[in-house]
Amino acid sequence: MSCARSLAGDPGVRVVGLARTPFELARALLGREPRVLVLSARIGRRPLASLLDALSLVGVRSRILLIGGRTSRTALLDALARGAHGYLRTRAVDAWLARAVHAVDAGETWCSRRLGAALLGRLFPDPS
């Protein structure tokens, strides 16, 4: 099921645009500042971290929730270190997307414990 259809049943969430490419994303964001931006971890050809850097440069302040399946752990850690607020595997969208969007909107980080621990290890390496 698509993310938009998965969120359609939640009265607390309003989908304001859909995009398949970074260019469509830029157009969809014109004049809008969604509180949560749900992005495919594989949008575009460039590394995900580059897209997040570009969004930050143009002043997008939306909290970003990434959706993906076969995204490398390194790419996810780079994205989370650059400001993405969460990651949800594609196969979990139907069951967890609405809950993840609400959590990210509330300022929480949404990711697996393993990914969270890896991120903390990367941000605060063991000094010994």
Image (cartoon, helix red, strand yellow):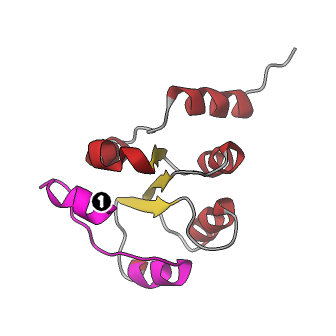
Q: 92 or 122, which is in the foreground? A: 92
Q: Is residue 12 left or right of residue 18?
A: left
The stretch in magenta equals 1-28
Q: Residue furthest right?
A: 128
Residue 35 pos. (x, y %): 34, 59
Q: Check disc 1 and report the residue beneath it.
A: 1
Is the residue marked by circle 1 packed among few (<14), some (14-19), or many (20+) residues within 10 Å?
Answer: few
Residue 86 pos. (x, y %): 48, 45
Residue found at x 18% / y 61%: 8
Residue 29 pos. (x, y %): 41, 77
Residue 81 pos. (x, y %): 65, 45
| Res. 110 image quadrant | top left
Q: Is residue 10 above or below residue 27?
A: above
Q: Is residue 52 left or right of residue 46?
A: left
Is 7 magenta? The answer is: yes
Is 16 magenta? The answer is: yes
Q: Is residue 49 left or right of residue 38?
A: right
Label 1: element kind:
loop
Q: 39 or 80, which is in the foreground? A: 39
Residue found at x 46% / y 62%: 39
Q: Which amino acid, by three-letter code, is at mark 1?
A: Met
Quadrant of the drawing holding the N terminus: bottom left
